[in-house]
Amino acid sequence: MKPKLTLKQIAKELDVSISTVSKALRDSNEIGEDTRQKIKAFAKLYNYKPNNIALSLKNRKTKTIGIIIPEIVHHFFTTVISGVEKVANERGYNVLVCLSDNSFDKEVLNMEMLANGSTDGFIMSLAKETMQKQDYHHLMEAINHGMPLVLFDRVVDEISCDKVIIDDVIGAKKAVQHLLDIGCKRIGLISTVDYVSVGKLRTKGYKEALQENGVALDEDLILKIEEIENSEREIEDFIAGKKLDGVFAVNEHFAISAIKAIQENGLRVPEDVSVIGFTDGELSKRFIPSLTTVSQHGERMGEEAATMLIEKLERSATEDEHYKTIIVEAGLVTRNSTKS
Amino acid sequence: MKPKLTLKQIAKELDVSISTVSKALRDSNEIGEDTRQKIKAFAKLYNYKPNNIALSLKNRKTKTIGIIIPEIVHHFFTTVISGVEKVANERGYNVLVCLSDNSFDKEVLNMEMLANGSTDGFIMSLAKETMQKQDYHHLMEAINHGMPLVLFDRVVDEISCDKVIIDDVIGAKKAVQHLLDIGCKRIGLISTVDYVSVGKLRTKGYKEALQENGVALDEDLILKIEEIENSEREIEDFIAGKKLDGVFAVNEHFAISAIKAIQENGLRVPEDVSVIGFTDGELSKRFIPSLTTVSQHGERMGEEAATMLIEKLERSATEDEHYKTIIVEAGLVTRNSTKS
DNA sequence: TTGTAAGCGTTATCAG
DNA sequence: CTGATAACGCTTACAA
């Protein structure tokens, strides 16, 4: 096992000083043509690569960006990671992934872990628990220490930073409008509790769409799910009692549970009931019937977030503090779970 | 924006030397009780956290492990990441995730990027292209430089290192045996090309099961998919012509495409044809009919891999070189795509 | 009990 | 044109 080659060793081997080697390798014209060539040849031959850690220490930047998400098995988040990865790698950055498991404590821990030199900035979607507690001191602290933060999807107004979100309200409106357009009269909403911002916003879109179309709001047709664990049961009960002809679910899982429940009630999708989900996952595409959904464009969100973060990182810190919120458009993807 | 607190600043503030601060914070008994308390109090008050980069440089270890996978949108890999994350975090390690996109070049690039000080060791599943080219110089190099490597799932005999795999052969046998047990006579296999090791092994299991049950092998009932892109078409054609009563697919996607094709041919699953997939994803669970699968236990594999890697990292490097291969058992999960 | 100095691998500044 | 030196933040012999 040979240890990694360092400048020092090259210097000793070639009998020059360390700084000469360093300069030669960076093509400084302070160094004579001949020595420069000699050094570069040697370095190439033995495959010298500068040590990132030393560079990080020197430059006070790590060229890595940390991404903290609530869970990775959720397909949406993995598409976001893909997007982040893509632009990060293009621009010479590494990506550190941490999972908060939706736990506030784990989120704080992860952030502290990464903040001590492991990363130059953060891309995050907040843990459910964090939004519940409304405790954002860890975010504030990172920002105070000059670490740029980009929030996506599960964002929060209290924090001033760059953000990438989709227009949940408009996305939801599009979905409900579509249901209305194809003739649905009793449209149910399956949402999450309100402190999950997406649940709140999508509910808002649902209500606005109804209102704009002059349909009276019936709170009875709204189901709010607290725990994913027993969501199937709750959805079954909900579907059984309401005589719906349209369902808008704020995520893929709820939509599929709804379809199952509808079918178990002896009705057909989409002939008797049309169903629209949110989030464009594998499941939606390949389920039978395939799901009409509001697509979140996760990869695109990841790309936007990474671009913003890197831009901020590479802008001289002294420039004007100005935060942007990029709203990526949610698009309706029509498939087979809605009548045409 | 206040910069992060360093030992140097604490030292200046408290008018002691840097090393005194360092020692005090590490509870060295070289330091007097009173100064020690004073320093620790100050550090706590201002929330001092040592800089990981400096520590990495000093200790020549980063406490992060790099994981390189072919793609993240594949559910199996995300469960592995979850498993790695879990034990890594428990033991104070960070996880760096890179994607090779199944490209050899990107895999090499990512490895070089991480090898220069960003990570202490690797957990990898090889890119398809890498297995095709059978070019493993980047893996050899990492090992030569003393960076432990744990390969999982897509592993390769030519490299001596720790490995975590499932018993693909036995898993496949279990599946085919199950099909035979419920009375299937013409069992089709939908596999990948042989240089993807899992394709080869699962095919082997398929053949062994048939043989052990005295069923003649009909190569005509085996479909090998090269590109995922047009797999649906190929599967449709395959299903249409063979009059199968059982199908074993080496992954979830193929299984679902098969079910679709079967249904489009006017047959029912599982009444007319039973289908078994491989990999236990969201899709299998929630598809209708839900899929009987051979579960790969991705999270468990991730945990095993991370444990092995960390163990190796923390063992003094001088200890005996000995590589283990952990074989995690693949289990049949019976659901609704097979007759009972 | 406390402080000094060297070193981890680099780069930048300044002398020679 | 080349080299010594300091610095990034930290630990650890070794002096004082």
Image (cartoon, coloured by chain):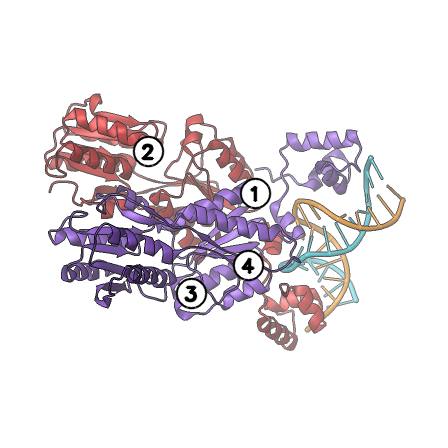
Chain colours: A purple, B red, C orange, D cyan
Which chain does the residue under circle 4 lie in?
A
A88 vs A67: above or below: above
Answer with mark 1 or mark 4, whichever residue precedes in sequence.
Answer: 1
Q: Name the residue under label 1.
A: A91
Residue at horizontal 36%, vertical 27%? B195
Co-location on one chain, circles 2 and 1:
no
Q: Quick check: marks 2 and 1 in contact, CB under 8 Å?
A: no
Q: Quick check: marks 3 and 1 in contact, CB under 8 Å?
A: no
Q: How far apart are marks 4 and 3 (CA)?
A: 25 Å
Q: Position of residue B21 (x, y in %)?
A: 65, 68
Near mark 1 (Cα within 10 A), the count class, few <14, some 14-19 or many ≥20, is few
Q: Distance between the residues labelled 2 and 3?
A: 39 Å
Co-location on one chain, circles 2 and 3:
no
Answer with mark 3 or mark 1, whichever residue precedes in sequence.
Answer: 1
Q: Name the residue under label 4.
A: A323
- Secondary structure beneath disc 2? helix
Q: Mark 3 points at which residue?
A: A104
